[in-house]
Amino acid sequence: MTTQQEAALSHKERLFRAGAKLFYENGFHGTTIDAVLAEAGVPKGSFYHHFGSKDAFGQAVLSRYMGFQGELVATWAARTDLSTADIVTGYYRDMSQVFIKSGFQTACLTGKFSTEVAATSDVFRPQLAGQIDGWKARLSALFTAGQKRGDVRQDRAAEDLADVVLALIQGSFVLTLSTRDEHTLEAVCDAIRQLIEPPN
């Protein structure tokens, strides 16, 4: 994006982008409002006009992030030319490529907040739990449809498959934040396919 295009963005949009970048880099506690303002290049009054507090800002950035994830899942789920396993592994590879291209920085913002603040925050824990439940519900619906079509194993409940797949996705990103080993992502992608497809 050019400097001119960046300047044309609304203050709220610039704050969203700055917040996502800094939360990925420094975590929620390691990101100050002043740092967000400096990154976004907007006045402090604009921040408080749109969000009111750092907690409210963090919640808004998380909601926006999960909106993007929902759109990405929906885009892949709409592919009628692919099997369910191809849809889910394609979605996971999309996430993985963004992660790798960022230098192993931008994994999953929901996962990052979950490991940092969910255990101690009554503000974020309900939101994160709701987002994860929604994520699992979208995957579960995908697996239910696949079971009806015959390309998803039927010896496991769709809800259980969704639980395990989401745990594999989140766990792989947590591990790879430290190791920066792309092989982990590929191994998990293969495991997801084996988990979904009907056993021979």
Image: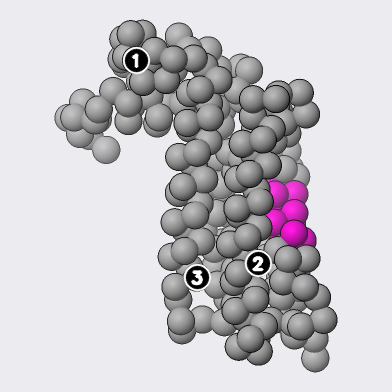
Callout 1 touching callout 3 (CB < 8 Å): no
For disc 3, the marked residue is: 77
Mark sitting earlier along the chain (3/2): 3
For disc 2, the marked residue is: 140
Callout 3 touching callout 2 (CB < 8 Å): no
**Residue at point 44%, 73% (across, down):** 78
Callout 1 touching callout 2 (CB < 8 Å): no
Q: Gap in Å between the C-alphas at discs 3 and 2? A: 12 Å
Q: Nearer the viewer, residue 187 or 111?
A: 111
Is residue 60 rendered to the left or right of residue 126?
Answer: left
The quarter in which the C terminus is drawn is bottom right
Q: Is residue 169 magenta?
A: yes
For disc 1, the marked residue is: 49
The image shows residue 185, relative to residue 149, as above or below, that is above
Q: Gap in Å between the C-alphas at discs 1 and 3? A: 37 Å
Q: Is residue 132 magenta?
A: no
Closer to us: mark 1 or mark 3?
Answer: 1
The image shows residue 87, relative to residue 101, as above or below, that is below
Residue 118 image point, x, y percent: 72, 31
Residue 152 image point, x, y percent: 69, 81
Number of numbered tags placed on the structure image: 3
Q: Secondary structure at mark 1?
A: helix
Mark sitting earlier along the chain (1/3): 1
Mark 1 neighbour class, 10 Å CA radius: few under 14, some 14 to 19, many 20 or more = few
Residue 28 image point, x, y percent: 60, 23
Q: Which residues are magenta?
A: 163-173
